[in-house]
């Protein structure tokens, strides 16, 4: 015979209960296994559980506990049995045969405590709990049994006590239980109301004692640990204080020497502070002067920028016009053997600027045996052979290979002045001859005018630089 019981968990409900009961009934009916359902009153946490147990005791069945697939298994097995026994093969008859098999193989054992109103209520609501059961009433344990159980429980627990203490504790537990039984009998005589002191109550007493003694021992152990730890810390602190006192005594001469040294340092700091105040005042004076110089430099820079702004638009306009000229248009000028005066003057002035007035020797010309002089037209034609390079020299900035206007000197400008003052060297007149030459004419005139503006502001720039360096220091 196998014992079948249920384990009540936090989420154990009616659904889980029915699943367990269906499994039990299938084992007893379909598998023909003899099972004993052991249920205590503490496991019947839901009224449905009690109702189902009463149904098992009365009819051996629990309504609506099987799933469809379970009913098919029951029908498959017991249909043949019904045929063999000459019974009808309807679903009702087949299921009734299954229940008969369940009743023959299933035994139910209920462990109830008579204490409390719940027991009385269940007996009234479900009479089958009494009518269909054989009541086995466990009487009170004798005094000898109470003592033996107490000793056994004390030996099983983690509480290690001597035999003498164990004997005395057993006597105490036995005395408590017997005294409680006498009080319940007296209570019944006086009030005619029954109160029970069961063996379960005795076991609960032993369990509670073991639990309480363990908690108290643990509490005492923790308190002892804290006390010992505190004493260790006090001892350690005392040793450290003694050590610090000895160190302090040993370092006392050093401290006195340090005091004297600190006093000297403070005197020196006072002197240094006085000197620092003087230097700070001087620094503030220098800062004020530097600020004035910086303001003067800013004014000079503005003057320089304003003067340069007067010359820059003309140069920018010339570069803008030059950037629109095609190299092929300049190459056409190279074909002139006797160019118009406007073209010749412009190209000679361009060549003069690009060479900074230093005509290469191969472009000198003159009568045989006579003095050779620079032929600026030939020099200009050499530039026109590579028109793209010529345009880059006039359009691009210095860092990209363009003309370095800052390198122009007065003797070069005096040579350019000859062309600048010529009536033929006017943009409008040159335009009538050649548009590309008109753009280069604008460029030459802009360079000429920029030179004098730059020459005018250079003294201001040179004057500003030393002041800026002095201010930055």
Image (tube, grey):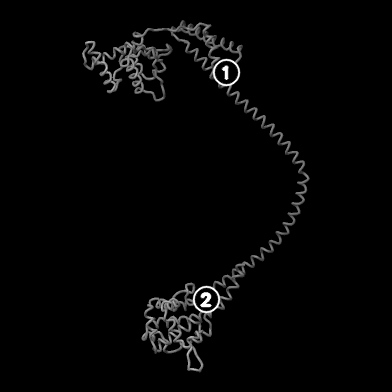
Q: Which mark is residue 393?
A: none
Q: Quadrant of residue 17?
A: top left
Residue 281, image x, y percentages: 66, 64
Q: Along the horizontal axis of the image, is 94 left or right of 316?
A: left
Query: Which residue carries the number 2 mark?
Result: 304
> SS of the residue at dot 2?
helix
| Few, some or many residues within 10 Å of mark 2 (<14, 14–19, 20+) | some
Question: Closest to the observer: 466 or 337?
Answer: 337
Looking at the rendered image, the quarter that the C terminus falls into is bottom right
Q: Are marks 2 and 1 in contact (CB under 8 Å)?
A: no
Of mark 2 and mark 1, the one earlier in the sequence is 1
- Work out whether 59 lies above or below 269: above
The 10 Å Cα crowd at callout 1, few under 14, some 14 to 19, many 20 or more, is: few
Residue drawn at x 52%, y 81% is: 408
Which residue is rendered at x = 43% and y = 12% of the image? 115
Q: Residue at x 74, y 57 (%)?
A: 268
- Residue 156, compared with residue 340, is above or below; it is above
* Residue receiving disc 1: 159
Q: Residue lying farthest front?
A: 368
Q: Tell me which corner region of the image, top left, top right, bottom left or bottom right, holds residue 237.
A: top right
Q: Nearer the viewer, residue 342 or 202?
A: 342
How far apart are the alpha carbons under marks 2 and 1? Answer: 104 Å
Spot occupied by residue 196 in the image (x, y as percentages of width and height) = 46, 10
């Amino acid at each position: 015979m196998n014992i079948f019981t249920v384990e009540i968990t936090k989420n154990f409900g009616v659904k889980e209960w029915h699943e367990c009961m269906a499994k039990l009934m299938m084992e007893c009916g379909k598998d023909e296994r003899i099972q004993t359902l052991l249920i205590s009153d503490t496991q019947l946490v839901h009224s449905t559980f009690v109702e189902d147990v009463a149904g098992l005791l009365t009819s051996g069945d629990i309504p609506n506990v099987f799933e469809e697939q379970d009913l098919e298994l029951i029908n498959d097995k017991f249909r043949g049995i019904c045929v063999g026994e000459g019974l009808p093969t309807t679903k009702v008859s087949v299921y009734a045969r299954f229940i008969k098999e369940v009743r023959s193989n299933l035994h139910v054992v209920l462990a109830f405590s008579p204490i409390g109103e719940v027991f009385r209520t269940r007996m009234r609501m479900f009479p089958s709990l009494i009518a269909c059961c054989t009541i086995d009433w466990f009487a009170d344990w004798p005094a000898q049994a109470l003592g033996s159980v107490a000793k056994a429980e004390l030996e099983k627990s983690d509480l290690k006590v001597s035999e003498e203490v164990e004997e005395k504790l057993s006597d105490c537990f036995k005395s408590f239980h017997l005294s409680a039984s006498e009080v319940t009998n007296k209570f019944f005589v006086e009030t005619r109301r029954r109160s029970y002191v069961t063996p379960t109550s005795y076991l609960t007493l032993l369990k509670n004692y073991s639990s309480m003694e363990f908690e108290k021992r643990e509490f005492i152990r923790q308190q002892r640990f804290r006390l010992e730890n505190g004493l260790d810390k006090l001892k350690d602190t005392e040793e450290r204080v003694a050590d610090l006192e000895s160190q302090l005594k040993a370092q006392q001469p050093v401290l006195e020497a340090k005091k004297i040294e600190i006093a000297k340092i403070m005197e020196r700091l006072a002197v240094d502070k006085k000197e620092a105040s003087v230097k700070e005042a001087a620094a503030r004076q220098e800062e004020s002067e530097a600020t004035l110089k910086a303001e003067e430099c800013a004014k000079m820079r503005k003057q320089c920028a304003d003067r340069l702004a007067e010359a820059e638009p003309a140069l920018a306009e010339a570069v803008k016009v030059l950037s629109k000229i095609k190299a092929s248009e300049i190459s056409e000028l190279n074909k002139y053997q006797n160019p118009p005066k406007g073209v010749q003057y412009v190209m000679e002035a361009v060549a003069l600027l690009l060479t900074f007035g230093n005509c290469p020797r191969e472009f000198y010309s003159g009568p045989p045996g006579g003095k050779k002089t620079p032929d600026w037209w030939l020099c200009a034609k050499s530039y026109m052979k590579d028109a793209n390079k010529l345009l880059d020299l006039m359009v691009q900035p210095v860092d990209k290979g363009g003309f370095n206007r800052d390198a122009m000197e007065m003797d070069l400008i005096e040579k350019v002045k000859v062309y600048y003052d010529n009536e033929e060297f006017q943009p409008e007149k040159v335009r009538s001859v050649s548009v590309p030459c008109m753009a280069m004419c604008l460029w030459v005139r802009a360079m000429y005018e920029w030179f004098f503006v730059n020459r005018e502001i250079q003294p201001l720039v040179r004057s500003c630089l030393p002041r800026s360096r002095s201010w930055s220091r």
